[in-house]
Image (cartoon, helix red, strand yellow):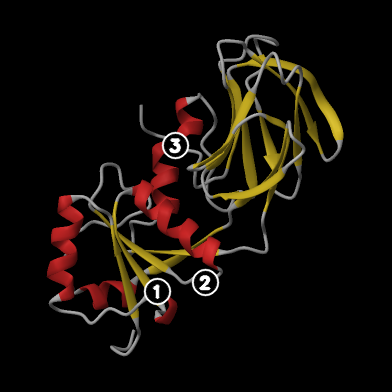
Amino acid sequence: MPHSRRMALMPSDTERAREAAEVLQKTFSFVPLEDAEILVVLGGDGHMLHCLHHMLDNGRVIPAYGLNYGTVGFMMNKPKSSRTLEERIARAKPLAVTPLNMVATTGSGAERSFCAINEVSLLRETRQTAKLEISVNGKVRLPELFCDGILVATPAGSTAYNLSANGPILPMGSNMLALTPISPFRPRRWRGAIIPDHYEMQFRVIEPVKRPVAVVADQKELRDVHTVNVRVAHEMRLELLFDPGRTLEERIFAEQFHF
């Protein structure tokens, strides 16, 4: 990668990330995001999601290279290397990530749309169990699901909340989505489904006044929803950059052999 390739820097507000940013700024001349060709993210997975959503919301999406100054760092690279940042980015392997698009209507009739890179979750708001009707491509597949909630996870998000809810790990490039119930009560033995990513899912809240439900798209929440539609936004494409041998694809695959 030529030295003239313009880079923007977005550190998280943790002390470690701020200190790392100060070191990098002494070596490289970073530019504002709107003028950059590469985004360098310092922090953890949560901050990477925040930065990716920031780009989606502002309509300017460029490749992102993350350095892990957080906890898990599934979407990040190791912070230390014998190579310079510029050399690491030049050698990095791109990985495409396609987000979900969620459209929800509330009890007031308002319609809101959010994107999700990891998952869209429907969650009960009160002690009352949620009661949901689930349709796929307009056909009702599950007339009634009593549960704490349900989520739709992408392959990139399948090792996050989805895995904690006993959902399946989906390899990158599988072109599948995980539909995973959260504490299902009835039907008790239903463990979810794997859905082709060109299908659309529709969720209808049954008894929404008595059993209110909120929807969360990654970090954005909307309460008192009555219907939620979820599809893969194939027209939106994000690109993450990884050091060779340490891609998100390899990490997600390897997670299937951890116990």
Residue 206: x and y in percent read 76, 19
For image coordinates 43% across by 44% down, the residue present is 252
Q: Toward the viewer: 16 or 118?
A: 16
Circle count: 3
Element marked by disc 1: helix
For discs 1 and 3, the disc positioned in front in the rendered view: 1
For image coordinates 31% across by 48% down, the residue present is 73
Earlier sequence position, callout 3 versus callout 2: 2
Element marked by disc 2: loop
Q: What is the number of the mark on residue 160?
A: 3
Q: What is the number of the mark on residue 219?
A: none
For image coordinates 71% across by 18% down, the residue present is 209
* Quarter of the rendering containing residue 22: bottom left
Question: Callout 3 environment at 10 Å: few (<14), some (14 to 19), or many (20+)?
Answer: some
Confirm whether residue 235 shows in the render. yes
Residue 131: x and y in percent read 71, 17
The N terminus is located in which quarter? Answer: bottom left
Element marked by disc 3: loop
Q: Toward the viewer: 242 or 234?
A: 234
Q: Toward the viewer: 30 or 251?
A: 30
As measured in the structure, the alpha-carbon distance from the residue carrying label 2 to the one carrying label 1 is 9 Å
> Relative to residue 153, is residue 49 depicted above or below?
below
Confirm whether residue 181 shows in the render. no
Provide the residue designation for mark 2.
60
> Relative to residue 256, is residue 6 depicted above or below?
below
Q: Mark 2 and 1 residues: CB-CB less than 8 Å, in contact?
A: yes
> Relative to residue 98, is residue 151 depicted above or below?
above
Instruction: Indicate the amino acid at tag 1.
Output: Leu
**41 left or right of 137?**
left
Question: Callout 1 environment at 10 Å: few (<14), some (14 to 19), or many (20+)?
Answer: some
Residue 192: x and y in percent read 65, 25
Provide the residue designation for mark 1.
33
